[in-house]
Structures are given as C-alpha cells and as structure tokens.
C-alpha cells in the first residue's frame, strides 16, 4: 500500500538550513506530482511547493521562493525540501502528499515539525 | 497567490445538513473543475473528501457532496454526525504556471 514518511524536522535558528525528506513506498514518485504542504501552529494549510511528474516543473508559494528547493531522487523514491534562510514564520508541520488530480491528495505523510527560533 | 474565501465557522445539529462555501475567481475556482475539499481533525493529517468538484474518493460516505457555480464551490455535509466535527479546507488548481491555493478553513461544530 501507499506510504509516505517524512523526516528531517527539528529546531533550528533563524537563517539556518534544514532538509526534509519524504520516503515513498507502494508507488513510483516519477509517475506523480508530489507536494509539500505546511501548517503553522493553529493556522490553516498552505501548499508550499510541488514537483510535477516530469520532474522539471516546480512551483513555490511566494513566501519561500528563492529560499526553498523541492527535488526528488527517483532511485531512492524520495522527495526532498531543502529549506534555506529559515525564518520564524516558516515554523509549522510540514506534510508530504501525493497528487491525485491537481491538488487533490489522498495520500499524506504523518508530518514533520519544523521550529525556527529567533 | 490569493487565498480562497470560506466562512470561519458552520454548525448544525445531528442529522441536519451544513453547507460550506468556497469563493475564488475566474483564475482558480471558476476557471477549472479542480476543486478539492479536505477534512482535518486536530493533530491529524488532512483527509481528502471531495476532488474534481464533486467526486468522492473510495471510502468517503455519500453524505459528503460537492458542487460549483461560477467562482464559488460548495461542500454539503448531510445527516451530520458527531464525527464530522472538524476543520474543512477547500483548494483549487490555479493554472499550469501557478501553485494551487487553499481557503482559510471552516470549523464545523456539531451541536
């Protein structure tokens, strides 16, 4: 069955970097768009970044563009989110999700918590 | 990347129906039939309950239904049950050059 397992979250100071990983099983990531969705404490959901199935087309929310990079390793069946120049407002739970049909995702990871301290 | 608009809260008694609106623009909700709805309970990952405006994933009760008219999509929960108490988020595709957008969420309370 499909499983997504995020890792790499933690506590980091403002301006530092973190790399999140999303290990997928039960399907091949090169056949699907893959999302990172984030949720600040007590706030709503936000599409942070997506890498589409061709591996070339990527989109980012304005607040992370130029600081975050989404990538994938097909041989490892893993999606990454490299987060640089982190800010306190990047604090939250980061979920990995598989795209079913243009931003509909029936498969989600358990989430990994990122805390950026000032 | 403008967010969609949802009412902050909605409520109903068990057995009643509740409808949640999701208003966007012709560049997102009105322009494509790619509106999805998610249910999220506290501390849990979101759960897809409607996709492509009105399709239900396997296992989602038919008490949940979706529709769209112009730039506004709607989620209706019929026959409310205590377990339906959660936050509900809509989201829409916004074109091939843009990231999708979420609404701010609607908290549904079962009275």
Image (spheres, coloured by chain):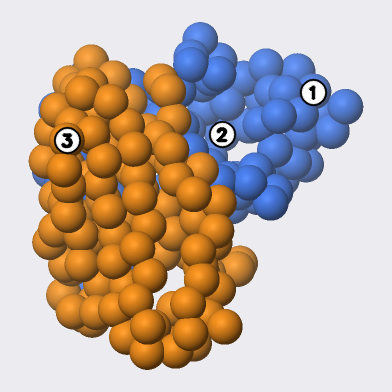
Chain colours: A blue, B orange
Q: Secondary structure at mark 2?
A: strand
Q: Chain of mark 3?
A: B
Q: Residue A76: name its quadrant.
A: top left
Given this view, does label 2 or label 1 mark the residue nearer the observer? Answer: 1
Who's the residue at 37% across and 83% down the image? Answer: B16
* Closer to us: A81 or B58: B58
Determine contact: label 3, label 2, CB under 8 Å. Answer: no
Who's the residue at 17% across and 54% down the image? Answer: B67
Determine contact: label 3, label 1, CB under 8 Å. Answer: no
- CA–CA distance between discs 3 and 2? 41 Å
Q: Which quadrant: the N terminus of chain B? A: top left
Q: Which residue is mark 1?
A: A14
Q: Which residue is mark 3?
A: B70
Q: Which quadrant: the C terminus of chain B? A: bottom right
Q: Residues within 10 Å of mark 3 (few under 14, many from 20)?
A: few
Q: Secondary structure at mark 3?
A: loop
Q: Is residue A22 left or right of residue A100?
A: right
Q: Which residue is mark 2?
A: A19
Q: Chain of mark 2?
A: A
Q: Secondary structure at mark 1?
A: loop
Are the residues flagged by discs 3 and 1 from a single subunit?
Answer: no
Q: Can residue B42 be seen in the rendering of this structure?
A: yes
Mark 2 or mark 1, which has the lower sequence index?
1
Q: Is residue A99 left or right of residue B17?
A: left
- CA–CA distance between discs 2 and 1? 15 Å
């Amino acid at each position: 069955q499909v499983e997504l397992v995020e890792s790499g979250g933690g506590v980091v100071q403002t301006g530092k970097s973190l790399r999140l990983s999303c290990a997928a099983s039960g399907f091949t990531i090169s056949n699907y768009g893959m999302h990172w969705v984030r949720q600040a404490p007590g706030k709503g959901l936000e599409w942070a970044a997506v890498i589409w199935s061709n591996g070339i087309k990527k989109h980012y929310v304005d607040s992370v563009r130029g600081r975050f990079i989404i990538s994938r390793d097909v041989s490892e069946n893993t999606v990454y989110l490299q987060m640089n120049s982190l800010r306190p407002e990047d604090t939250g739970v980061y979920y990995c999700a598989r795209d079913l049909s243009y931003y509909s995702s029936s498969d989600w990871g358990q989430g990994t918590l990122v805390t950026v301290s000032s | 990347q403008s967010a969609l608009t949802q009412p902050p809260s909605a409520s109903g008694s068990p057995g009643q129906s509740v409808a949640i609106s999701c208003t966007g623009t012709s560049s997102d909700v009105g322009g494509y039939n790619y509106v999805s709805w998610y249910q999220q309970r506290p501390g849990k990952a979101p759960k897809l309950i409607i996709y492509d405006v009105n399709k239900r994933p396997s296992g989602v009760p038919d008490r949940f239904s979706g529709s769209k008219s112009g730039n506004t999509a709607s989620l209706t929960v019929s026959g409310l049950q205590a377990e339906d108490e959660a936050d509900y988020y809509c989201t829409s595709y916004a074109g091939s050059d843009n990231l999708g957008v979420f609404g701010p969420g609607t908290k549904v309370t079962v009275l």
